[in-house]
Image (cartoon, rainbow, N blue to C red):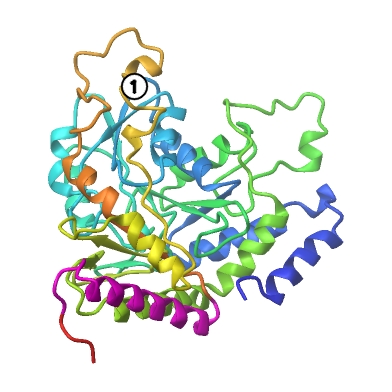
């Protein structure tokens, strides 16, 4: 079960407090302390969702109106929206054709005098190539903010994903490895950044701090008639105690929950073995994939399309196949628009990066996105996972027998 008796017991603890203010934020404090320990960082600050986490992290990094942040276009558009929430402009760098992640070789051409941060995404559960990204960032004195919404217990050359950037962001949305329905976490080793994140997500309260559980002010303080609460403008992005209770239970089962996903991915990997027209996302040596989903790319030379394959997969008993998101700059909110004008500027600054939100901006991402198929990995019943793998193998065999697929090696 994705939700166990452990999570239910923690929720009951919160309900037993009847939400008395004297109970404080005990559950969020426990969650934050444990999260920081398990990801080997000093500070963890809980949030209401995984878009708020990005907004807070960017703000803590000093991103504001008129700045630029380098992002990949192939991901959920919340990454770019968070940049725009800061009044800044996302600048899109192309992706690697095999890992589907931000291509380090495409970053430096996107850097301008206005660049304030680089925000790579650990897509589908796979770390980006962090060493060259961090090296580029260091050369240009830029913070790296990891968007790790889809990656829990992923590793890059022995380092856990979430521990390498200046700040990192996790999501507990319902589809993620760890879920509390909604929620998120920002991690950092920098006490100043942690305090800035805490204040940003807690209405700018002066009494909050970097340490776990310091997201609320005390009753004695708030009752003082001369107390000046707000030292800065902030948002109410704090996680509720109920969500924290569920997230804590999930965190304590993290290894179990991630291992289920990895086992599901293994079933799909076995199904596509020998098929030369479905290519899985490549995890290079030294990477550990955590498989938020199992993503494969359809060879464009086959004489059937994405929709044909999904239809056959579902007909044979598959749960369905998810596409990759439309590229952020091709979404209607961005397409054919000047992002600087969207942020209220009459004209693009001369020292900014010139990009047009239209086809041709990131050719690799544009070629990859329509061909990606994502298979679900959140089965806790391995019998169901095995069945989905068998269905995938049957769908592949169907297209091979019909002559629609390319030649494949014989199955054992």
Residue 248 rendering spot, x and y as whole percentages: 62, 65
Residue 198 relative to residue 189: left or right = right
Residue 77 lies in quadrant: top left
Residue 253 rendering spot, x and y as whole percentages: 56, 75
111 w.r.t. 384: above or below = above
Residue 271 lies in quadrant: bottom left
Residue 96 relative to residue 180: left or right = left
Looking at the rendering, the stretch of residues picked out in magenta corresponds to 380-408
Q: In this figure, which residue is indicated by the disc labeled 1?
A: 339
What secondary structure do most residues of the magenta stretch adopt?
Answer: helix
Question: Camera-side residue: 141 or 317?
Answer: 317
Residue drawn 39% across the image and 66% down it = 312
Quadrant the N terminus occupies: bottom right
Residue drawn 75% across the image and 43% down it = 218
Q: Is residue 268 in sight in this rendering?
A: yes
Helix, strand or loop status at disc 1 = helix
- Would you say residue 255 sits in the magenta stretch? no
């Amino acid at each position: 079960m994705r939700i166990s008796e452990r999570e239910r017991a923690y929720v009951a603890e919160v309900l037993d407090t009847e939400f008395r203010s004297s109970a404080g934020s005990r559950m969020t404090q426990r969650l934050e302390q444990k999260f920081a320990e398990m990801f080997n960082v000093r500070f963890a600050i809980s949030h209401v969702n995984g878009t708020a986490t990005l907004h807070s992290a960017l703000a803590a990094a000093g991103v504001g109106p008129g700045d630029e942040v380098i992002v990949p276009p192939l991901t959920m558009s919340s990454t770019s929206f968070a940049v725009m929430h800061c009044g800044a402009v996302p600048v899109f760098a192309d992706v690697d054709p095999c890992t589907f992640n931000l291509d380090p070789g495409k970053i430096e051409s996107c850097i301008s005098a206005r660049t304030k941060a680089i925000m790579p995404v650990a897509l589908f559960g796979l770390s980006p190539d962090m060493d060259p990204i961090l090296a580029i960032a260091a050369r240009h004195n830029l913070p790296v903010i990891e968007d790790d919404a889809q990656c829990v217990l992923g590793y890059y050359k022995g380092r856990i994903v979430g521990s390498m950037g200046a700040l990192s962001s996790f999501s507990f949305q319902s589809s993620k490895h760890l879920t509390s329905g909604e929620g998120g976490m920002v991690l950092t080793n920098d006490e100043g950044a942690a305090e800035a994140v805490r204040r940003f997500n807690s209405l700018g309260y002066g009494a909050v701090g970097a340490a776990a559980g310091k997201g609320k002010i005390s009753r004695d303080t708030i009752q003082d008639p001369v107390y000046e609460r707000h030292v800065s403008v902030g948002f109410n992005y704090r996680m509720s105690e109920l969500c924290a209770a569920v997230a804590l239970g999930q965190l304590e089962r993290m290894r179990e929950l991630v291992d289920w996903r990895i086992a599901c991915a293994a079933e799909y990997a076995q199904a596509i073995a020998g098929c030369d027209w479905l290519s899985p996302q490549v995890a290079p040596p030294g990477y550990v994939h955590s498989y938020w989903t199992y993503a494969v790319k359809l060879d464009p030379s086959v004489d059937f399309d994405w929709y044909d394959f999904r239809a056959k997969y579902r007909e044979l008993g598959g749960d369905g196949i998810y596409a990759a998101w439309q590229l952020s700059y091709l979404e209607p909110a961005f397409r054919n628009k000047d992002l600087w004008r969207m942020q209220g500027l009459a004209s693009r600054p001369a020292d900014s990066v010139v990009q047009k939100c239209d086809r041709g901006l990131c050719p690799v991402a544009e070629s990859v996105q329509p061909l990606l198929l994502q298979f679900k990995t959140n089965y806790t019943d391995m019998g169901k996972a095995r069945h989905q793998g068998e269905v995938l193998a049957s769908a592949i065999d169907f297209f091979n027998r019909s002559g629609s697929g390319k030649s494949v090696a014989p199955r054992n």
